[in-house]
Image: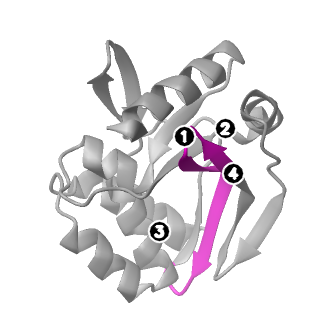
Amino acid sequence: MRLATVLAEVAANLDAAGVTWIVSGSTARRLLGASREPRDLDLEVAVGHAEAAAAALGFALPPAAGGGVSSRRGGGRVGGVEVDVSAGVEVRGPGGVLTRDDAGLRDGVIPVLLGGRTVWCGAPEEGLVRALVSGDWERLAKIASGGGPPPRLDYVARRLAAAIAAR
């Protein structure tokens, strides 16, 4: 899998720069057993490490906003694979306000052994929670159709309660 090779290269660069990061999106879900083949590599980094991540990967991470989501976001191609990097993701929608600070970046992550190293996959439920908060039913359907591990309801409940409280 070319994605695994690129992930190993990106991971080595981020680790060498001291960046706290996780694999997210469809790549994380695939590593955790989902059937859908990812088209790109999604990563989230601690917002306090955004500049170091950008330098390590050669991407700019400017502020980005749209569709109720704001973050620092950028990307490019590594080894022929599209790599998308986000930091400080905040989702605003009818379900409240969902933030993730640097301390919470690795909340609910699942370690996966890949090529002799541990890769931290973001909580697979995070995409589900973000879609619920934003009211994005299309994204919910896409997540549900991809398979993967069943949602951990305690994680979903905790994140939704935080979103509602932050309204």
**What x and y, as percent, mark residue 115?**
32, 18
Q: Sequence order check: which comes first, mark 3 or mark 4?
A: 4
Q: Earlier in the sequence, mark 4 or mark 2?
A: 2
How much space separates mark 3 and mark 4, taking CA atoms? 21 Å
- As for residue 49 lying within the magenta part, the answer is no
- The residue that appears at 43% across and 75% down in the rendered structure is 131
Q: Secondary structure at mark 3?
A: helix
Q: Are marks 2 and 1 in contact (CB under 8 Å)?
A: yes
Which colour scheme appears in the figure?
one colour
What amino acid does circle 2 point to? Ala
Disc number for residue 75:
4
Q: Which residues are magenta?
A: 75-95
| Secondary-structure class at tag 2 | loop
Q: Residue at x 46, y 41 (%)?
A: 23
Secondary element under disc 1, as helix, strand or loop, is: loop
Q: Which residue is mark 2?
A: 46
Amino acid type, callout 3: Arg
The nearer-to-camera label among 1 and 4 is 4
Q: Alpha-carbon distance for marks 3 and 2?
A: 18 Å
User: How much space separates mark 2 and mark 1, taking CA atoms?
Assistant: 7 Å
Dot 4 falls on a residue whose secondary structure is: strand
- Position of 84 compared to 122: left or right? right
Q: Nearer the viewer, mark 3 or mark 4?
A: 4
